[in-house]
């Protein structure tokens, strides 16, 4: 839809339309901070953790591009993206509610597939919804406000267990028959409620713009079938803009590193701070709680940084800002395994927070300025394939060299992740050169 037909929204409405990201990212935060420990409580080996997390990258690889292409072709009475929001939110809530009740590893893996399917069905149309609803001028604030809610939602998810122990007074050692802490069950229940209510609030407060008759006629002429959808995805890949092709290399290093960090940071803290490797010990549960506080802190940094970097992104361009933030994140990841005092963990977490804020905003600014608007959904879906493919690669390859090359030491995983984030910083600068200065940088230079 042309910018001239898109009404300018007050900043509060832009914030409300992205409120659903709070619930969505609360869900992701719970996964990042709790799924590896849940598997360990149920008896999983450290080397197998990435394989057990396959649901996220596989569902993202299969679901996001298909949902993106389908939402581009949808012209229902409820809108193009809304049906996918609602269905995905319901699946997500179901997965969250039942996850901490898992009696076995198999049950937890099965529920993770449901949870990640719901997350991915909602995620991709949400990105396209911002491009649909906002003019080019307001789109930057729209994506960076999503980044801010990513930081806030995940911060709350990470801090929820600490709040329950230190403020409400729950016992950190209170566990069920399957060794899963009671505080974990309560946190997931809160997540189930938030994921559903915040998404519903967003779509009812800021509904999609109605399609014009010309748009409806064009969409009716496009078949909404699996074959047509796959053909659309393949055609979009073949004709992918140069900038997007180069961003694929950034995504490879960036997301391989993030997946490794999420999977092993708790095990790294447990060893470096407590010299503990037993997942059923109290010290390990304290490491989980410490990671929640550190994760909450870096997501708080991300929440603030997402808004604070708006003028810098306008002045220097999204590629330069993203490269700087990735480098800061890489230094933080490399430093964490060398910290033996819990209090000092928060210093490198600042770098991780800057990187996370930029990851959830700046690449989408670069992308949105390089793709045709009528194919936003499918290209957002393909871009998310570039996110989950490195995670899938990590899940398959990490068990192959975790013991042999890394000595079975999760601290070395984090050091590797720090190096890879530096490589991603170089790649995004290369991608930015394919189009020269971004529109925002040009405007600032005038």
Image (cartoon, helix red, strand yellow):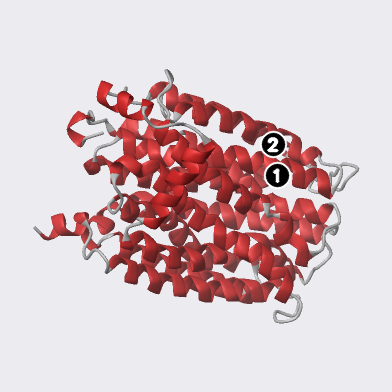
Residue sitting at the far left: 446
What residue is disc 1 on? Answer: 112
Are discs 1 and 2 less than 8 Å apart at CB? Answer: yes
> Based on the displayed image, in which of its 4 quarters is residue 69 positioned?
top left
Residue 132 location in percent, x, y? 33, 35
Relative depth, front residue between 3 and 36: 3
Circle 1 residues within 10 Å: few <14, some 14–19, many ≥20: many
The quarter of the image holding the N terminus is top left
Rendered image quadrant of residue 311: bottom left
Name the residue beneath numbered marker 2: 95
Q: Is residue 229 above or below residue 48?
A: above
Indicate whether 85 appears above or below 274: above
First of labels 1, 2 by sequence position: 2
Which image quadrant is residue 411 in? bottom right
Residue 18 visible, this orientation: no
Q: Is residue 145 left or right of residue 178?
A: left
């Amino acid at each position: 839809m042309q910018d001239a037909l898109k009404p300018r929204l007050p900043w509060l409405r832009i914030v409300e339309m992205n409120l659903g990201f709070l619930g969505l990212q609360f869900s992701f935060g719970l996964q990042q901070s709790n799924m590896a420990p849940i598997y360990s409580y149920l008896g999983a080996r450290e080397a197998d953790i990435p394989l057990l997390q396959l649901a996220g990258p596989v569902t993202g690889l299969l679901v996001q591009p298909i949902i993106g292409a389908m939402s581009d072709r949808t012209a229902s009475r409820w809108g193009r993206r809304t049906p996918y929001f609602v269905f995905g939110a319901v699946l997500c809530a179901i997965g969250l509610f039942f996850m901490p009740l898992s009696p076995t590893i198999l049950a937890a893996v099965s529920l993770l597939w449901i949870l990640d399917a719901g997350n991915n069905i909602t995620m991709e149309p949400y990105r396209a919804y911002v491009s649909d609803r906002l003019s080019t001028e307001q789109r930057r604030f729209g994506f960076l406000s999503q980044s801010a809610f990513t930081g806030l939602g995940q911060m709350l998810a990470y801090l929820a267990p600490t709040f329950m122990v230190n403020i409400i007074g729950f016992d950190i050692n209170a566990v069920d028959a399957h060794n899963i802490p009671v505080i974990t069950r309560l946190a997931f229940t809160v997540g189930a409620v938030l994921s559903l209510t915040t998404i519903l609030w967003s779509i009812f407060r800021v509904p999609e713009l109605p399609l014009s008759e010309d748009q409806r006629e064009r969409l009716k002429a496009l078949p909404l079938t699996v074959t047509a959808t796959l053909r659309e995805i393949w055609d979009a890949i073949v004709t992918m803009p140069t900038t997007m092709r180069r961003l694929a290399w950034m995504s490879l290093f960036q997301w391989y590193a993030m997946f490794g960090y999420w999977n092993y940071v708790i095990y790294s803290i447990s060893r470096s701070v407590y010299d503990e490797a037993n997942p059923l010990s109290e010290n390990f549960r304290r490491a989980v709680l410490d990671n929640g506080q550190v994760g909450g802190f870096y997501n708080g940094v991300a929440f603030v940084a997402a808004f604070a970097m708006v003028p810098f992104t306008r002045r220097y361009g999204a590629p330069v800002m993203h490269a700087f933030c990735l480098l800061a994140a890489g230094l933080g990841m490399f430093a964490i395994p060398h910290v033996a005092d819990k209090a000092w963990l928060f210093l490198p977490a600042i770098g991780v927070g800057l990187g996370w804020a930029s990851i959830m905003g700046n690449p989408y600014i670069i992308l949105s300025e390089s793709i045709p608007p009528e194919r936003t959904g499918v290209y957002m879906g393909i871009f998310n394939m570039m996110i989950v493919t490195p995670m899938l690669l990590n899940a398959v390859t990490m068990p192959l060299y975790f013991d042999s090359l890394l000595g079975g030491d999760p601290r070395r995983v984090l050091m590797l992740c720090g190096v890879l984030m530096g490589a991603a910083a170089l790649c995004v600068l290369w991608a930015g050169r394919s189009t020269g200065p971004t529109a925002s940088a040009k405007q600032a230079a005038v």
